[in-house]
Amino acid sequence: MPKKTETLQDKRMLELDVLRGFAMLVVVSSHISSVAIGNLRAGRGHFLVSMLQSSFNFSVPVFFLVGALLSAYSASAKNPPIWPYYKKKLLRLVLPYLAWTLFYIAFNLFVHRIGRADLRSFDNWVKWITQGRAYDHLYYLVVIFQFHLLFPLLLKLAKLVRDRPFWAFAIVVGGHHVVYWLNKLWLYKAWPYFSSSFFWHFSIFFLGLYIGLNYKKVCEWLERNLKWLIIVCLVSAAGFLYLRYLLYMKINYHTYFYYTIRLVYVTSLPLCLLAVARRLRDTLKRGIRHGQAFLFARKWAGRALLWIGRYSLGIYLAHPVLNHYLREWFKTRNVILLGLICAVAVVVYIAVCGVMTMVLERFRLTSWIVGAKASGGKKKRSGA
């Protein structure tokens, strides 16, 4: 990894790359765990893996929160010009999204998930392109694009409560309730894919905007109140996993409790992880003397997560192809063998897709495919 000056490191906000790296590791692990669930019979092993996968539910919200945080942080001094901003997002989000949508449509055709008759359906093309349904994970880019489309308005709202944490909290909580009940009472019929839209994730995005506008203050608050935040996180995690257990056992309950407790879980855990990532960042900047084995391990863990975080978009977009073939080729009910295969697969997916992304980013003709700007091997990224 090239050495950088302290100023450039601070500007880069290494802790957010580390945080994204951990989230990407969890995303890949979650998708690979679905292979284990598909192979295991109903029983203790199936239940434990299902609960583990449920605990990974926070991973994608981390990317939503970090994306909003970076966008607000970079625009905190002044409002960005609207049209240059939209042009940048067109190049960094829309074009890669369309390219990967076409790729996955072709891939689905190749592996017989769809047939030629499906290509002749106008409704299918509308669903694939506007809803991110060419492959399950592509909805993420649709949600991110919707956020950036509304970003100028959202930023103005966030700046109104920049120094008013109570009102920011009220918007996060109130937004969650408005969105949930609108969907529950009406929207789920009129808009079947509403849960794959920006509006469904509004509270997480707005929290990210508020943190981005008050980043230094929020980090100081985290240092003072981390133990209380950890308690909130553990309690919400326990509540969330209990509700997932009820779902696993097919015991019905009102979904309001599920989505409300989930919001607390998927916002409190990323904030705890941000505090950890900042400490890893400090370790990355610190010289390691002989005999400091723990700091040495932390530094290398931080570097690994930093690398994953920097190439996370390409890893996210490409790894489902590998997961498809893992699901097709490996059929075993041996728990030990299955665990070993899944652990190796996590490393292989990240290494293969990360290196592929790194190579694509080196060249102007291919860097846009993974949402980056080529600069002679040194990449420049948007706040997305």
Image (cartoon, helix red, strand yellow):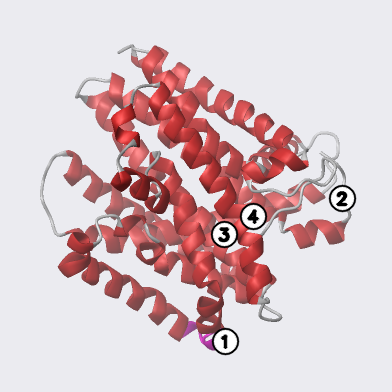
At x 80% / y 56%, what residue is drawn? 9
Query: Which sits earlier in the primary sequence, circle 1 or circle 2?
Result: 2
Residue 248 picture quarter = top left
In this rendering, does residue 268 appear at all? yes
Percent across and percent down for residue 139 are 42, 49
Percent across and percent down for residue 354 are 64, 33
Separation of residues labelled 1 and 2 (CA atoms): 33 Å
Residue pointed to by mark 4 = 91
Amino acid bearing label 2: Lys
Mark closer to the observer (4, 1)? 4
The residue stretch that appears in magenta: 160-166
Amino acid bearing label 1: Asp
At x 61% / y 76%, what residue is drawn? 213
Query: Which sits earlier in the primary sequence, circle 4 or circle 2?
Result: 2
Residue 198 picture quarter = bottom left
Mark closer to the observer (3, 4)? 4
Residue pointed to by mark 1 = 163
Residue pointed to by mark 2 = 4
User: SS at mark 1?
Assistant: loop
